[in-house]
Amino acid sequence: MASDFRLKEQLPALTQRIVSTYTRDDRINHLGHCPLPKYEIVVSILEDLKDILYPGFRRREGLHIGNVTYHVGNLIDSLHDKLTTQIGRALHHDDRVRGRSSDCENQIDYEAKGQSIAIAFLELIPQLRRMLASDVEAAYDGDPAVSGRDEIIFCYPGLEAITVQRIAHQLRRLGVPFIPRMMTEWAHQMTGIDIHPGASIGEYFFIDHGTGVVIGETCEIGSRVKIYQGVTLGALSFPTDSDGQLIRGQKRHPTIEDRVVIYANATILGGKTVIGHDSVIGSSVWITSTVASHTTVVLEKPNLRVRGSVPDELRAEANYQI
Amino acid sequence: MASDFRLKEQLPALTQRIVSTYTRDDRINHLGHCPLPKYEIVVSILEDLKDILYPGFRRREGLHIGNVTYHVGNLIDSLHDKLTTQIGRALHHDDRVRGRSSDCENQIDYEAKGQSIAIAFLELIPQLRRMLASDVEAAYDGDPAVSGRDEIIFCYPGLEAITVQRIAHQLRRLGVPFIPRMMTEWAHQMTGIDIHPGASIGEYFFIDHGTGVVIGETCEIGSRVKIYQGVTLGALSFPTDSDGQLIRGQKRHPTIEDRVVIYANATILGGKTVIGHDSVIGSSVWITSTVASHTTVVLEKPNLRVRGSVPDELRAEANYQI
Amino acid sequence: MASDFRLKEQLPALTQRIVSTYTRDDRINHLGHCPLPKYEIVVSILEDLKDILYPGFRRREGLHIGNVTYHVGNLIDSLHDKLTTQIGRALHHDDRVRGRSSDCENQIDYEAKGQSIAIAFLELIPQLRRMLASDVEAAYDGDPAVSGRDEIIFCYPGLEAITVQRIAHQLRRLGVPFIPRMMTEWAHQMTGIDIHPGASIGEYFFIDHGTGVVIGETCEIGSRVKIYQGVTLGALSFPTDSDGQLIRGQKRHPTIEDRVVIYANATILGGKTVIGHDSVIGSSVWITSTVASHTTVVLEKPNLRVRGSVPDELRAEANYQI
């Protein structure tokens, strides 16, 4: 290369300067002897689970009744090992962060705990399949643009998002730290749909299009609920304690009852807000109080200003861009 | 590892329980002897096509007039094979789903059909290049933040989305099932832009920023149309037949005529809705009826409540978060 | 395969037809002897930088004070080489596009310039770490759903987006073309957050959820600013010169002062628009003029139409979908 090798002689001094920032301010490094949960392994756990939940649709071809037991048995065995290790690390790191453990003590105890959680989670797979089969039905029944159930499993982002969230939700219920949120943020990156692992979601759940959907940590959603892109189910206020610190864990997000439909870009906020069953929330509606059952809520048609030409002063107003 | 190997003895029984769900409820598995279209191959087809549509910008370096024929010839040959196989599988799977074929009969006939479609599609590449060159021009003319055409091809998500959609649209017109939707959902994942393969889009098409754009299956869009982030071109109602089943295939989405500009977060709905040529639809407007040509539509300025301080009761109202 | 090999004989003629489009219309190809910046290398530069900015959280496990100097020194050396090459190519391509250089002259001079910029950039890493540590604090203080700082570094999309933007912004200030925008569009693809490398952003910056956020090229943002999903900080009009060409480079985007909070889906436009410090901009507000400090701006509650049942005519109105 044509660069000047003498300039490279600055690099060791720069390296020292960078390393000194690690000791001076350590809040954004992790240096120690105990490994953290590994993001790439968590993602591979999700891919392995999808191969078991929807066999034949993804990586492995040529599956049939004669060989599927080996396929599943192999994946379950590998998942057991990966989950045991990653959950053990997550539990240990969480205790370390909360000051309940010094670095790397009792690694063996954490792995044992990780194993019992891993097995408890894997036992839930038949139940997960039943829930996800209902979600696929909901998508098929709710979308006129779909040609068949296979299309949904091949590529619908809403199904991808709820698949990951149901997995993450169960791991969270079993007491696993970090990993559930890593999973749902990966799904958020893939689909643009952001559902916190804490949200409880009933069966036959369908998100269509989905980009921009945000569902908060303490949401409760019933069965046969349908949601469109850009919908926010959020919190209304964020109470702080006497030190001015945020209070974590309270119910801050709404409850959506059975058979509710929420159209694109609607915003529903508040831990006490309930959307009654069989209601319809129209596009772009903003709600912060309870809605009874069998109710429709739409915006009054906003007044539009319409001109038969495009005069300059209106062009200056309409013609904004980035 | 420190985990208890005796606990692993539960895993075979769990494997059996999972496999039994495959026979009991088979709607979300694919077990059989005929392979489905493979998502990873479909994505590689898109990457190969981009290397031909925009040579020199992606994977292959050092292309020049002396070697580009080998580069293209090699990719075309490989694309022929991949497309033949994947399209054949898609056609066969579609017939199987619709009950028109038993498992794995006539695989040879489906491959032959796949080949004729693959060749017909590849013959469209010169025409695709012309359309995409116009889309790059539209981006250059329409975005003051762009420094040059190369920047658009390097990294503009709007161009990525329309490139994939134009490919998927042609495959759909040639009668290919599944694969067009797999392609546009992959682009949706990459860009946050969701354009159904069925939408017909004219030349010089520009989407700026794009996150959250949804363009429905039966949209018709003219030439020199410009769209911003969060715009929905959607359906107004979803008619059902006498059995309560959704009717699929009708025109449900709007028609956008030439030289229309649609600003961020506007929503335009309905199969009978036409936005006349040379019109401007302002940000956040909600339209469900036809707009004449040379018309501007903006919202009446909504009343804003403004207080010179941030009192608690307003903070409770404004201070919502997730 | 069962396809007809005689049909493959059409492919060479098709190859020739495609190659002839390269000479006839060359605006969307890059054929020549000088390589362009390579997208995959630019992405790997970002991954290497994240390994230095947040050591121990990503690829490399088992880092501790005893070996971290080798880890960093190794990455710095490799980054020096990659940045030198890619920046050299970017500078050369930019001059070629602007007609200031013929193809492949003076490659050595461009690499030398690339090296001096690469080293100047790497020297900024300690300062980048300080800024990013403040951004992590801002996320921890601002989000009641977060369990700890590690969760933020593991997987928060807002932190991913600002990490990449701060890197890209510095490269842009050092005069690097193309690469900064390639970086922020990659972050846009990963997170749904679109921040132009030109935007100047103060410390303690937090974007929560983030999908759909758009921050324009000439935005200026102060310190301790918090932004939610769907917020647009955009331009109001796009002036053209006497030839009708867009004028590039003017301040077109707003200024946001310290300690401002902007809630979901708000839109703030215009190069002269200033949001005064300590103000709160409520959800879905649309602002095109300056707001004083210590001010709250919320929408008047829009009138909602509420019916106790779901009658057909309202269902037709509310029941739109894609």
Image (cartoon, coloured by chain):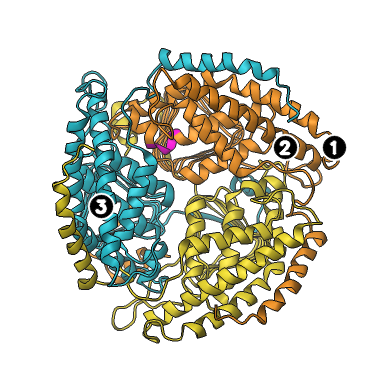
Chain colours: A orange, B cyan, C yellow
Q: Which mark is residue B253?
A: none
Q: Is residue A180 left or right of residue B304?
A: right
**Magenta residues: mostly which secondary structure?**
helix
Write the residue at 68% across / 25% down. A117
Q: Relative to residue C235, is residue A26 depicted above or below?
A: above
The percent coordinates of residue B194 (x first, y second) are 36, 46
What's the distance in space between the residues labelled 1 and 2, CA to CA? 12 Å
The percent coordinates of residue B89 (x first, y second) are 27, 34
Residue A100 on the magenta segment: no
Q: Is residue B198 left or right of residue C264?
A: left
Q: Which mark is residue A105?
A: 1
Q: Which residue is mark 3?
A: B77
The chain that hosts pointer 3 is B
Of the residues shown, which amino acid type is indicated by label 3?
A: Asp
Residue placed most toward the observer, C275 or A153: A153
Q: Tell me whether the residue at label 1 lies in contact with that at label 2, contact meaning CB atoms closer than 8 angstroms.
A: no
Of the residues shown, which amino acid type is indicated by label 2?
A: Arg
Secondary element at image label 1 = loop
Q: Which residue is mark 2?
A: A89
